[in-house]
Image (cartoon, grey):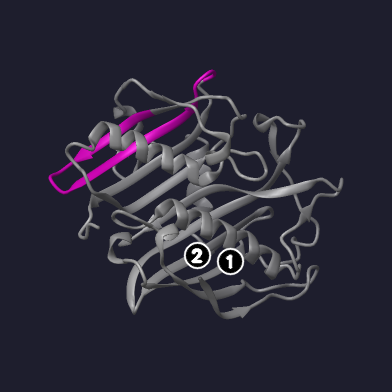
């Protein structure tokens, strides 16, 4: 169950609006948990939904329904997501998870949200999300996603310093980097990719797009197949996902390990997700994973 604690909305659409701030308690049960604590997949889905709702609230809309000048429905597609100082293994069933969120417009077409997680005063991590409004340029074709502007939002104040993702994600998406989080592009090993066929009923969202949380979930499955015998109970300490594209239903993806660091208790890796048929880059996923402290 989710209980609203507080909400401060922005001014009506068309007027300058500050960042929206909200707090809520989630009583944790089976939908929210895994064998090793809080479900990262559930968490990203929940925070993605909150991100979308906060944009609507900050712009004075009763529902998160946005259209462009042509009247076409547009969606908030994520460019980047980062998890920092994760302690997802520090919660159990019946705990109350407190989520405190705020959001701001960080560029002409982008919004960033910040989410702090805690339980009974214990910090569980921070999540930042960066999104842009998009629509399909061709009906039913997810490879035709294009960026669009939404009227009424441009009057909201720009706060580019609100999130560290604002400058970092565009650089990573353009490939203008040599080293990131200790991984180097010139040292990326050539490893055989694992082919995955995303499932329409599990991995795609209501807009028919491969859901942003499905990238992380697919990487975790490949990690488990490759390293599970040595690291049977991993939890995320930090994760950064940079999104670059999408696929159509029925199109396989390839997940390749590009960077790796191992210790007895920690596994850090960089996986690249591409469209299997074309090699088009869909996402880079940088993760730091550690042995969970509690096991069910």
Q: Contact (CB < 8 A) between labels 2 and 1?
A: yes
Prevailing secondary structure of the magenta residues: strand
Q: Where residue 116 sits in the image (x, y, percent)?
A: 43, 69
Q: Residues within 10 Å of mark 1 (few under 14, many from 20)?
A: many
The residue located at (78%, 68%) in the rendering is: 13
Residue at image mark 2:
114
Q: Residues within 10 Å of mark 2 (few under 14, many from 20)?
A: many
Q: Which residue is nearer to you in this view: 47 or 9?
A: 47
Q: Is residue 280 left or right of residue 87?
A: right
Vertical placement of 107 versus 229: above or below? below
User: Can residue 224 be seen at all in this image of the molecule?
Assistant: yes
Q: Report the magenta residues as a range.
A: 256-278
Q: Where residue 124 sits in the image (x, y, percent)?
A: 34, 67
Vertical placement of 74 versus 254: above or below? below
The residue located at (69%, 49%) in the rendering is: 75
Residue at image mark 1:
103
Q: Which residue is nearer to you in this view: 290 or 181?
A: 290
- Please check the rendered image and state whether residue 261 is part of the magenta-colored stretch, yes or no: yes
Q: Where residue 20 sits in the image (x, y, percent)?
A: 62, 72
Vertical placement of 99 versus 227: above or below? below
Residue positioned most to the front? 30
Q: Where residue 26 sits in the image (x, y, percent)?
A: 47, 71
């Amino acid at each position: 169950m989710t209980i609203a604690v507080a909400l401060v909305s922005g001014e009506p659409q068309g007027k300058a609006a500050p960042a929206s701030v909200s707090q809520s308690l989630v009583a944790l049960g089976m939908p929210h948990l895994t064998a090793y604590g809080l479900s990262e997949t559930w968490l990203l889905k929940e925070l993605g939904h909150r991100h979308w709702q906060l944009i609507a609230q900050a712009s004075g809309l009763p529902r998160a329904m946005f259209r462009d000048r042509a009247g076409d429905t547009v969606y908030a597609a994520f460019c980047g997501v980062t998890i920092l100082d994760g302690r997802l293994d520090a919660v159990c069933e019946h705990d109350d998870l407190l989520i405190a969120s705020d959001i701001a417009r960080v560029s002409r077409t982008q919004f960033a949200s910040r989410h702090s997680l805690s339980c009974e005063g214990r910090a569980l991590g921070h999540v930042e999300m960066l999104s842009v409004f998009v629509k399909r340029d061709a009906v039913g074709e997810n490879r035709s996603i294009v960026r669009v502007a939404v009227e009424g939002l441009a009057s909201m104040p720009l706060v580019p310093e609100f999130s560290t993702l604002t400058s970092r994600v565009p650089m990573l998406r353009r490939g203008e980097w040599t080293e990131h989080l200790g991984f180097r592009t010139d040292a990326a090993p050539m490893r055989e990719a694992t082919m995955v066929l995303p499932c329409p009923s599990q991995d795609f969202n209501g807009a028919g797009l491969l859901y942003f949380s499905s990238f992380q979930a697919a990487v975790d499955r490949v990690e488990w197949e490759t390293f599970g015998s040595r690291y049977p109970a991993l939890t995320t300490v930090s994760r950064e996902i940079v999104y670059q594209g999408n696929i159509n239903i029925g199109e396989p993806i390839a997940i390749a390990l590009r960077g790796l660091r191992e210790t007895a208790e920690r596994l850090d890796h960089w996986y690249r997700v591409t469209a299997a048929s074309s090699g088009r880059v869909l996402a880079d996923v940088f993760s730091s994973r550690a042995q969970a402290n509690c096991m069910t």
